[in-house]
Image: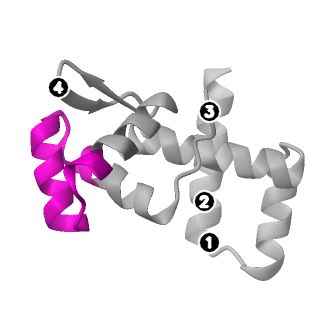
Amino acid sequence: MEELRLGVVESQFAEIIWSNEPLPSGELVKLCEQKLGWKKSTTYTVLKRLCERGIFQNEKGMVSARMTKEEYDAAQSEKFVEENFGGSLPAFLAAFTTRKKLNKSEVDEIKKMIDAIGKEG
């Protein structure tokens, strides 16, 4: 799979698909013209590129996601932690909390997530 990271304009395009999927490619062209000011060729060029990256698919003129927004966000988060903290979530949290202190509610939420993961394993 190619690089998943989306630029600003690609992100706007992806949001259109995620918000309206599944949708006919012709409808996507109309939405991109209205919201982004794009021509048909631009829409199809960007769609093709994001399909090649495995984020979307265009099957028989119907555009849909191969990866939900949540899955995309999770992949981006994992990649960030991997690239910047050697894949260590504790190292990320340590760095994050040196500048932003967590409130009790956030700490409780993180504890619940850890407890839930412990029960699954």
Q: CA distance from mark 1 to mark 4?
A: 49 Å
Q: Which residue is found at the position 11% from the left and 53% from the top? A: 30
Verify CB contact (< 8 Å) between mark 2 and mark 1.
yes
Q: Which residue is found at the position 60% from the left and 59% from the top? A: 108
Could you classify mark 2 by the number of other residues whose Cα lies within 10 Å: few (under 14), some (14-19), or many (20 or more)?
Answer: few
The amino acid marked with disc number 2 is Asp
Q: CA distance from mark 4 to mark 2?
A: 46 Å
Could you classify mark 1 by the number of other residues whose Cα lies within 10 Å: few (under 14), some (14-19), or many (20 or more)?
Answer: few
| Mark identifier at residue 61 | 4
Dot in front, 4 or 2: 4
Verify CB contact (< 8 Å) between mark 1 and mark 4.
no
Bounds of the magenta segment = 16-43
Q: CA distance from mark 3 to mark 1?
A: 40 Å
Dot in front, 2 or 3: 3
* Pointer 2 or 3: first along the chain: 3
Asked whether, in this view, residue 86 is left or right of residue 12, the answer is: right
Q: CA distance from mark 3 to mark 4?
A: 23 Å
Verify CB contact (< 8 Å) between mark 4 and mark 2.
no
SS of the residue under disc 2: helix
| Residue wearing tag 2 | 108
| Residue wearing tag 3 | 2
Dot in front, 3 or 1: 3
